[in-house]
Image: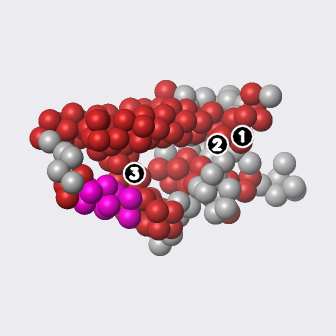
């Protein structure tokens, strides 16, 4: 049952429709020889998406203008993702497009832009919000994403990605299995 929940929670636009995000992270960013499971695996994706993503975004939305600093921190996660998908993944992978890039520009970029426009136009932000929000946003990006990948890396994990989640060159055919 837990394995099924991990699979369900681990699949989103980067894992389902375009689907190659896990393989790209493991192969391109970490030069892994086990791109279906190491260092990023499906369980790590759940921790990153649910704990860092949903939990912090939920509280930022719930608290709203009472915790603008938390909104800044979470929006910096979106900004970090946009930079990673737009520049880092494409430069390192020598590609023009990667899984998640369209989502970043169609949904994340406008949210980032309108968040900052709104907090300034409505005079919701203070210098203290920036002093708390920016460092927390950096911590969420580094610890909540990059370090989670390192901490939960497990070559023997049972939470492997399906072949469709790998880059085409890394997919095994029925003859290879």
| Residue denoted by label 1 | 7
Residue closest to the eye, 88 or 125: 125
The residue carrying mark 3 is 78
Q: Does the magenta stretch include residue 117?
A: yes
* Viewer-nearest residue: 7 or 171: 7
The answer to whether the residues at label 1 and label 3 have Cβ atoms under 8 Å apart is: no
In the rendered image, residue 51 lying in the magenta stretch gets the answer no
Instruction: Report whether 76 appears left or right of 89.
Output: left
Element on which disc 2 rests: helix
Determine the residue located farthest toward the left in the rendered image. Answer: 127
Residue 85 position in % (x across, y down): 44, 59
Spatial CA span between label 2 and label 3: 18 Å
Say which quarter of the image contains residue 116: bottom left
| Magenta-tinted stretch | 110-118
Tally of numbered tags: 3
The residue labelled by disc 2 is 10
Identify the image quadrant of residue 74.
top left
Image disc number at residue 31 = none
């Amino acid at each position: 049952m837990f394995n099924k929940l991990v699979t369900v929670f681990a699949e989103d636009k980067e894992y389902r429709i375009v689907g190659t995000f896990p393989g790209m992270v493991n192969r391109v960013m970490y030069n892994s020889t086990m791109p279906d499971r190491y260092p990023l695996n499906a369980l790590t994706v759940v921790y990153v998406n649910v704990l860092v993503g949903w939990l912090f975004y939920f509280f930022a939305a719930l608290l709203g203008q009472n915790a603008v600093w938390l909104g800044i921190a979470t929006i910096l996660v979106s900004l970090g993702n946009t930079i990673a998908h737009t520049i880092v993944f494409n430069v390192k992978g020598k590609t023009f497009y990667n899984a998640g890039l369209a989502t970043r520009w169609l949904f994340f970029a406008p949210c980032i832009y309108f968040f900052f426009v709104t907090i300034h136009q409505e005079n919701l932000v203070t210098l203290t919000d920036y002093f708390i929000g920016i460092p927390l946003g950096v911590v969420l990006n580094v610890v909540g994403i990059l370090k989670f990948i390192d901490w939960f890396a497990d070559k023997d994990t049972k939470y492997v990605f399906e072949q469709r989640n790998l880059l085409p060159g890394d997919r095994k055919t029925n003859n290879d299995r």
